[in-house]
Image (cartoon, rainbow, N blue to C red):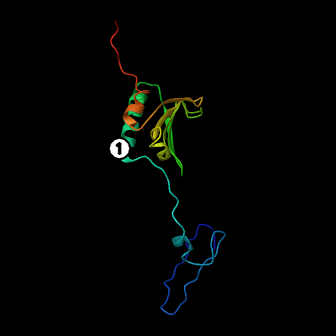
């Protein structure tokens, strides 16, 4: 049998025993994965992503941003903005629910680690990145 040949599958008969595959992460029970608590993952909601991506679209149209990356972890969710794909991020937009009551869940961080703005409202936090036209006096 070569690597490209399909694997023949056959249905199990009623009297056949179910085999349990034991791998490196298995605890000996076929229900081991069901008994473990699911890992919590922080993510942006649909409305939050709409706000971030609308700002991203405006900045791409202006020629300032070219690429982005998203990272979702157990502690926080991060949306990174790049000028070029091979560089370090220009800005990171972070959502950390553990800081929601203290300082606000959202933050915009500069490349040197300086927090430009933090708060409970994503739209207001993103205003620090949105360059609006102002009349010249």
Task: Name, please, the residue furthest toward the bottom.
Answer: 15
In the rendered picture of this protein, how many numbered marks are placed on residues? 1
Determine the residue located farthest toward the top in the rendered image. 137
Between 39 and 89, the one nearer to me in the picture? 39
Res 54 → quadrant: top left
In-front residue for pair 96/89: 96
Q: Residue at x 53, y 59 (%)?
A: 39
Q: Residue furthest front?
A: 102
Q: Identify the residue shown where x is 40% and y is 22%.
A: 131
- Where is residue 104 shown, x and y percent of the image? 45, 39
Q: Nearer the viewer, residue 4 or 94?
A: 94
Seen in the picture, residue 89 relative to 16 is either above or below; the reply is above
Q: Residues within 10 Å of mark 1 (few under 14, many from 20)?
A: few
- Image quadrant in which the C terminus is located: top left
Image location (x, y in percent) of residue 30: 56, 78
Q: Residue at x 50, y 86 (%)?
A: 12
Q: Is residue 73 left or right of residue 125?
A: right
Q: Secondary structure at mark 1?
A: helix
Q: Is residue 116 above or below residue 69?
A: above
Q: Position of residue 119 (x, y in %)?
A: 43, 35
**Residue 52 is drawn in which quadrant?**
top left
Residue that numbered label 1 is attached to: 47
Decide which of 15, 100 is in the foreground and name it. 100
**36 vs 63: above or below:** below
Q: Is residue 28 above or below residue 123?
A: below
The picture places residue 1, in percent across and down from the top left corner, at 63, 74
């Amino acid at each position: 049998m070569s690597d490209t040949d399909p694997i023949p599958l056959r249905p199990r008969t009623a009297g056949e025993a179910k085999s349990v595959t034991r791998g490196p992460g298995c605890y000996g029970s076929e229900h081991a994965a069901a008994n473990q608590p699911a890992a919590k993952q922080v993510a942006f909601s649909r409305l939050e992503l709409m706000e971030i991506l609308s700002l991203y679209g405006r900045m791409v149209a202006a020629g300032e941003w070219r690429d982005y990356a998203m990272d979702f972890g157990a502690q926080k969710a991060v949306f990174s903005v790049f000028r070029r794909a091979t560089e370090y991020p220009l800005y990171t937009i972070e959502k950390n629910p553990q800081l929601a009551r203290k300082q606000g869940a959202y933050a915009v961080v500069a490349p040197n680690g300086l927090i430009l703005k933090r708060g409970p409202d994503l739209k207001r936090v993103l205003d620090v990145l949105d360059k609006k036209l102002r009349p010249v006096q």
